[in-house]
Amino acid sequence: MIEMTFGFGLLLVALGIAAGIINTLAGGGSNLVIPALMIAGMPPDVANATNRVGVMMQSVTAVKQFHSKGKLPTGDLKAILFPTLIGGFLGGATASYAPAYLLKPALLFTMLGMAALMVFKPSVVIPEAGTPVKLVGQTSGAWLALFVAGFYGGFVQAGVGFVLIAALAGTLRYDIVSTNALKLVCTVAFTAVALALFIYNDQVAWIPGLILAVGSIIGAWLGVNIAIDISPKTMKWVLFLMTLVAVIAAMLN
């Protein structure tokens, strides 16, 4: 059992703010939160589950912000969510019962893959201005890419933003602001499924999770305003640097 002190509570709020900003702009915020919870004494499965409370709240907050600013495209939303939800359910079920040692290789593989994309083919992640958007049914591999993103998000969460960016910008060619908005809708969907499974298996530490959520809400609000104002060129470098940090964090944890 983790002892909740005032100092630890402040740390959780600060981690939530940082994770909310990072996850809204790109992904990898859970690389900060999950190791911190484990260092505090949580088993890996409980840390993974508890982190989802903050992820859920920050994602809902960010989606509302994007929608209120007219930056959330909804035309193909049902088709995008369907494979994501199926993947999220299967990924969450796997995380609830799979050995904890599987989490790190999955995270590291994802981070390295995204770093390679950013270096060798950045146009996959950030399409050129004016690139036409494609529908899920029109694009070979889009359904599979979204299913994989959902599965990974349900399984480990950390770094899933990078997988969703690759799926939404890479296969469907959404611009980076629309990609971030849709990415967070998908995150709400598979996080809700995974969190329900974790709650059912009594794997969530609620007090740390809710304190973390307070910071996450603040971070998500800040992240949306940064995402809308930032230029695509700058965003490309933000994504690249966050990817490198996420790779290093995955190697060290």
Image (cartoon, helix red, strand yellow):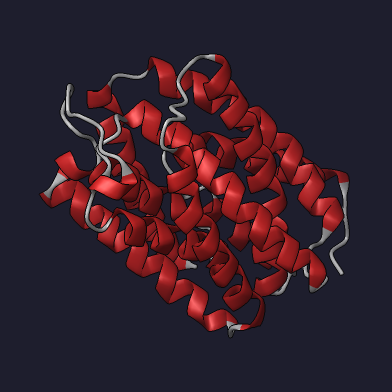
Query: In percent of the image, x 37 and y 54: which residue is there?
Result: 163
Along the viewing direction, whichever of 238 and 202 lies nearer the viewer: 202
In the rendered image, residue 155, in percent from the top left (x then y), is placed at: 54, 68
Quick check: 233 above or below 87? above
Side (left or right) of 34 relative to 206: left
In the rendered image, residue 227, in percent from the top left (x then y), is placed at: 43, 24
Residue 169 visible from this viewpoint? yes
Give the farthest residue toward the front: 137
Q: Picture quarter containing residue 25?
A: top left
Side (left or right) of 249 relative to 57: left
In the rendered image, residue 216, in percent from the top left (x then y), is placed at: 66, 37
Give the farthest residue toward the bottom: 99
Query: In percent of the image, x 70 and y 59: which residue is there?
Result: 195
In the rendered image, residue 35, in percent from the top left (x then y), is placed at: 59, 62
Query: In percent of the image, x 11 and y 51: which residue is there?
Result: 120
Quick check: 63 above or below 212? above
Side (left or right) of 230 relative to 12: left
Side (left or right) of 200 relative to 127: right
Quick check: 81 above or below 105? above
Query: In percent of the image, x 27 and y 42: which residue is there?
Result: 172
Residue 159 visible from this viewpoint? no
User: Where does the N terminus fall, quadrant-wise?
Assistant: bottom right
